[in-house]
Amino acid sequence: MKDNININKVSIITPSYNSEEFISATIEGIINQTYTNWELLITDDGSSDKTIDIIKEYQQKTTKIKLFQLKKNGGAGIARNNSIKNASGRFIAFCDSDDVWKYDKLDKQVNFMLKNSLSFTYSAYQKMNEQGVKGAKIFPPKKTTFNSLLKSCTIGCLTAIYDTNVLGKRYMPTIRKRQDYGLWLTIFKDIKHTVGIYDEVLAFYRVRSNSISSNKFKAAVYHYRVLRECGEVSFLNSIYLFLHYSIKGLFKYFK
């Protein structure tokens, strides 16, 4: 019979692509977790810098890090899905190769899930720039539903954890952008009362000037695509939701 240590293992999903500047901080934040029952699955999406060398150096320090290398660049969704496929843990968590977790993130969040019988949780997070200077804190709404998600994605990927014992392994759509949003929509179709929000900053999201998410117009276009493909929203309703998302984004931009 498996003991609780094996049952409650966390598989951390990290895609990497030319991440030599930031991936050490990401890995250090995971290695230093007070919750020690984890594995880190990094799928590299065709890096041409020193990312692979850095990851292999950390593999010399711990056997908990698994590295997979894709022959062809396919995007973060494909890289994440490869790691999910190879994951052996009960819980699936996400941390991109430029983001950083607080040392007690897993400890607090996993125990929160177990205590309250939750199948999906996420938390507040704080933005930081490329130099690591902390910025705005992002607190999600007190309640999130499938319908509210259709209007706006309020779940930070770096904070999300889901329980495969309840949901099975769930994979991201293989579109280039907004894959995490697509996954949340498919999960929220199936769960109602087993979602929990940990109302504390547990991670730091790095805002990069050349990131996919920094292009607001492209993000809006992919928001529409996710609504159609993952939210199964009708054409007319998706146009309404697209406009809602775009106008809200413009308001924030000019505020």
Image (cartoon, grey):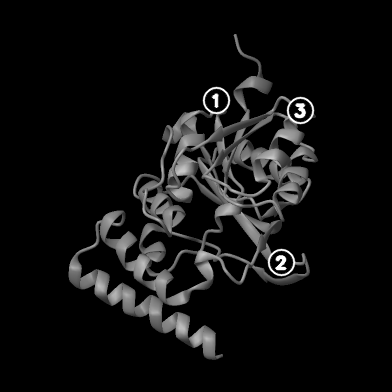
Q: Residue at x 39, y 79 (%)?
A: 246
* First of labels 1, 2 by sequence position: 1
Between 164 and 15, which is closer to the camera in this rendering? 15
Residue lying furthest left:
235
**Amino acid, disc 1:** Ser
> Could you tell me how far apart the alpha carbons at marks 1 and 3 are, in whole angstroms?
17 Å
What crowding class fits label 2: few (fewer than 14 Cα within 10 Å), some (14-19), or many (20 or more)? some
Q: Is residue 156 visible?
A: yes
What crowding class fits label 1: few (fewer than 14 Cα within 10 Å), some (14-19), or many (20 or more)? some
Where in the figure is residue 230, as x and y percent of width and height?
31, 54
**Amino acid, disc 2:** Glu
Q: Is residue 197 visible?
A: no
Residue lying furthest bottom:
254
Q: Residue at x 24, y 62 (%)?
A: 233
Between 23 and 237, which is closer to the camera in this rendering? 23
Q: Which mark is residue 88?
A: 1
> Could you tell me how far apart the alpha carbons at marks 2 and 3 are, in whole angstroms?
27 Å
Q: Which residue is mark 2?
A: 130
